[in-house]
Structures are given as C-alpha cells and as structure tokens.
Image: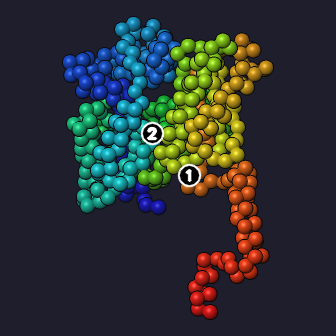
C-alpha cells in the first residue's frame, strides 16, 4: 500500500447541507426572500412540524442551543422565532449530484460516504510540486475546490486536508463554515490531542463515556494510553481502533466504488396517529405508496429482493419490525405492498396486535432486502412446475411424431451440420 505520507486526501463536507440547499433553492425561486442561513432556522422531515424532529439547523439556531435530532416542539421552546421548513429530499439528491460532479472534475478518486460528504485522493494532482511545497499546493487546491463549489452552486463546504482519511475527516470538522483546515502528522499534538475524546471520529457516545470513566478525557489521553489496556476495557477491535485513531494512524484507501445497498426502504410519519378505527383508510394507501417508491428504486438499479420488511413506530416511540421471505426475488410494487400489508394486519390488527394493546401508530416503513441482480433470479417452485408442464407437452408431441415417422424425424439444430456432412 502507498505510504500515507505520500498521499494527499481531502474530506469535503457541506455546511448544514439540508438547510443550505433549501436556502439556495428558495433564493433562486425568490431572490428577495430571506436567506435561511442568516436566521434561526431548521429543516424538518415531517410536514406536521409539531410531530417532527430537527434534521438540520442554521448557525444562528445553533447559538440558541437547537440540536439536530431533537423534537421541533423542544427546539421552538429554545427559540420562539425559529423558522421551520419542510425537507425536500428530491432537491437534496440533485444538489448532492451537482457537488459530486464538481469533485469528479478534479479526480476520479472520489468516494462519496453520504449525501453531503466525500473523500478525494488528490495525490496525483500534487506529485509534480517540489516535495517541500506539496503541503502548500494541496492547501491551495483545497481552497480552489471550496471556492468553486461556492461560486457555481452557491452553498459552502469545509475541506479537510491530510495524508489519510481519518485526519482529513477530523480536519473538516474544525471551525465552520467555508473553511479549509489541515491536519498533518506533525499537527496532531497541537490540533487534535487537546480535543474531548468524544470528538474522535468513530468514537461513539457509549465508548467515550466508558473512556471518560477511566480518566481518558481527551484524544491525547487515549493516544498515551496502553493499547492492551484499551483492548481489555473496550474489546480487542474497538481498543485497537481508539488507540490507532488517537495517534492519527489510518491507511485505508479512497475507494471510488460505493458499497452496494444491502436493502431498500422508505418510511413516513403519518399525518395523524393510525388506530383500529382508521387503519384501513390511512395505513393501506401509505403502504402502497411506500412500496411503489421502494419498487421504483429497485427497478432503477436492476435489483430484486427476496425479503419484505414492515416496520412501525408506536405513539410511545417504540419501533417494531416484522419481515417475511418471498418465494423469489421481486421488484414488483404490488407484490411488495401486498406482503407488507399482510404483515401490518397481523402486527397491528391481529388478535394480539398493537391495536388490541391500546397502541397507536405514528410511522410506517417498508423495506426489501436479500438483494440480487434482476437479470438472474431463482425460480420459485411454482415457476418450475409451470416450466415443467410447458416442456412436458413439447416432449409428448415429439414422442408422438417419432412413433409415427421414425426416430430421426426430430433432431437438435446443433446436429444439422453433422447430418449435412454425413
């Protein structure tokens, strides 16, 4: 593997992506409207703001303590002037595609890791610079990427610059927005080690809480800790990761190929709670709609799936799922919908279902997993029986012809040349 100090990796991260993309779109449609990025504003997925959660927030909203993932009701209590706007995921996909087009104009080595983040390996663009000037050249290139995005697409990104993906990601999370930050190996002690352990990329809340209880409060503390001790406390794999990451060690390559989806799913919070009295009216069309969306994505990717999953969230915020295997892979919306509806009726309306327990449902999701390519899928037993019946009739007809006219009356096309030569 290439020496990581010879690599130059960018991590590009859109600043407040959903909110920024919404703001740009609103300004494009109405140049006189207020820029959501300049006021306390938040994006919500649910059209009923009172039931939704914050999916993105502006910097002014952050100053009021508004947090991503919190209920909008709670956010409104923190900031009564908070402007709430419904999410537009079709718009976000288009903005993401435009961003990736710009990144690919620099290099083919682009690894998209989410709708608003990507790694770039720009080593080939830096290699001709004198060794002593390569860091500066990389930083100038990062500024060019950042400015190009802002000038063409009118939203901002942060770019982290480093010799590996881990450090580039850490650098891009430094001060925002519209910034370029470096984090090379000789900068780790000054820039990364003083940070709280919870800010180490890949260190989750449970792990950071455990480390803090052990007296490891900063990334530098973790870097100084004995790896064997960390493995004893966190497990072999997690302990090694924390130890190496805290010291800036990472040799994973930028992989242009995204991992194939393991499943396709879609879910939606209901306009009103679904109950035993209204589930036929509200749940059935919603399941059809979600199934059609999933089927459309499967077909677009020439993929079929052989397991259907139905998930719900109850009014006490419990998430419950049920799934069933199919006889054969499918991307047919009706098959998916019928299967999901059967699962819903049993889970919610059955003799021991959620409605009998006094529960109401506020979210429904439909998913398909166990995927395979659409150009080849295993036939079900029913399909095989039909094929056998069809070819059985052909065999019976052939037998009758041979009995009447002789065995040589019917032969394979591949044997024709042999008969001509003989």
- Residue that lies at the very extreme toward the bottom in this rendered image: 422
For mark 1, give the secondary structure.
loop
Residue annotated with mark 2: 114
Q: How far apart are marks 1 and 2 (CA)?
A: 25 Å
First in sequence: mark 1 or mark 2?
Answer: 2
Along the line of sight, which residue is nearer the eye, 99 or 162?
99
Q: For the point 47% across and 49% down, which residue is it?
A: 258
Residue holding disc 1 = 374
Give how far across and how far down residue 273 sits, in percent.
59, 14
Residue at figure coordinates x 36%, y 21% from the top left: 58
Given residues 334 and 58, the one toward you in this image is 334
Q: Where is residue 25 in the image (x, y as percent from the top left)?
A: 29, 27
Q: Residue at x 74, y 51 (%)?
A: 381
Q: Does 228 appear above or below 378?
A: above
Quadrant hosting residue 113: top left
Residue 402: give x, y in percent of width and height: 74, 76
Q: In which quarter of the image is residue 42?
A: top left
């Amino acid at each position: 593997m290439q020496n990581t100090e010879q690599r130059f990796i960018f991590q590009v991260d859109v600043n407040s992506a959903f909110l920024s993309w919404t703001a740009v779109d609103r300004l494009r449609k109405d140049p006189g409207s207020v820029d959501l990025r300049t006021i306390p504003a938040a994006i919500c997925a649910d059209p009923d703001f009172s039931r939704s959660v914050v999916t993105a927030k502006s910097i002014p909203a952050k100053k009021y303590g508004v947090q991503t993932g919190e209920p909008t009701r709670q956010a409104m209590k923190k900031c009564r002037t908070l402007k709430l706007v419904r999410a537009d995921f079709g718009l976000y996909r288009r903005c993401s595609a435009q961003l990736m087009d710009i990144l690919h104009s620099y290099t083919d080595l682009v690894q998209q890791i989410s709708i608003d983040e990507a790694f770039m390996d720009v080593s080939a663009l830096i290699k001709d610079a004198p060794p002593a000037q390569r860091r500066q050249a990389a930083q100038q290139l990062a500024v060019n990427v950042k400015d190009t995005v802002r000038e063409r697409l009118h939203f901002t990104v942060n770019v982290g610059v480093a010799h590996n993906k881990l450090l580039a990601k850490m650098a891009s999370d430094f001060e925002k927005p519209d910034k370029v930050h470096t984090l090379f190996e000789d900068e780790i002690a000054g820039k990364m080690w003083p940070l709280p352990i919870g800010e180490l990329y890949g260190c989750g809340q449970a792990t950071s809480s455990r480390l803090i209880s052990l007296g490891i409060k900063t990334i530098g503390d973790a870097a100084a800790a004995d790896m064997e001790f960390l493995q004893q406390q966190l497990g072999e794999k997690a302990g090694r990761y924390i130890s190496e990451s805290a010291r800036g060690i990472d040799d994973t390559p930028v992989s242009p190929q995204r991992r194939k989806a393991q499943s396709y799913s879609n879910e939606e919070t209901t306009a009103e709670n679904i109950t035993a009295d209204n589930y036929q009216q509200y749940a059935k069309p919603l399941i059809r709609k979600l199934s059609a969306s999933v089927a459309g994505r499967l077909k677009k990717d020439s993929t079929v799936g052989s397991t259907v999953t139905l998930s719900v969230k109850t009014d006490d915020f419990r998430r419950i799922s049920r799934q069933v295997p199919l006889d054969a892979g499918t991307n047919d919306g009706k098959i998916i919908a019928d299967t999901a509806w059967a699962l819903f009726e049993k889970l919610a309306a059955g003799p021991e279902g959620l409605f009998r327990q006094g529960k109401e449902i506020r979210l429904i999701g439909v998913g398909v997993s166990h995927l395979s390519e659409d150009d080849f899928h295993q036939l079900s037993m029913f399909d095989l029986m039909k094929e056998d019946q069809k070819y059985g009739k052909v065999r019976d007809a052939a037998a009758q012809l041979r009995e009447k006219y002789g065995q040589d009356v019917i032969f394979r096309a591949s044997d024709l040349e042999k008969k001509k030569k003989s």
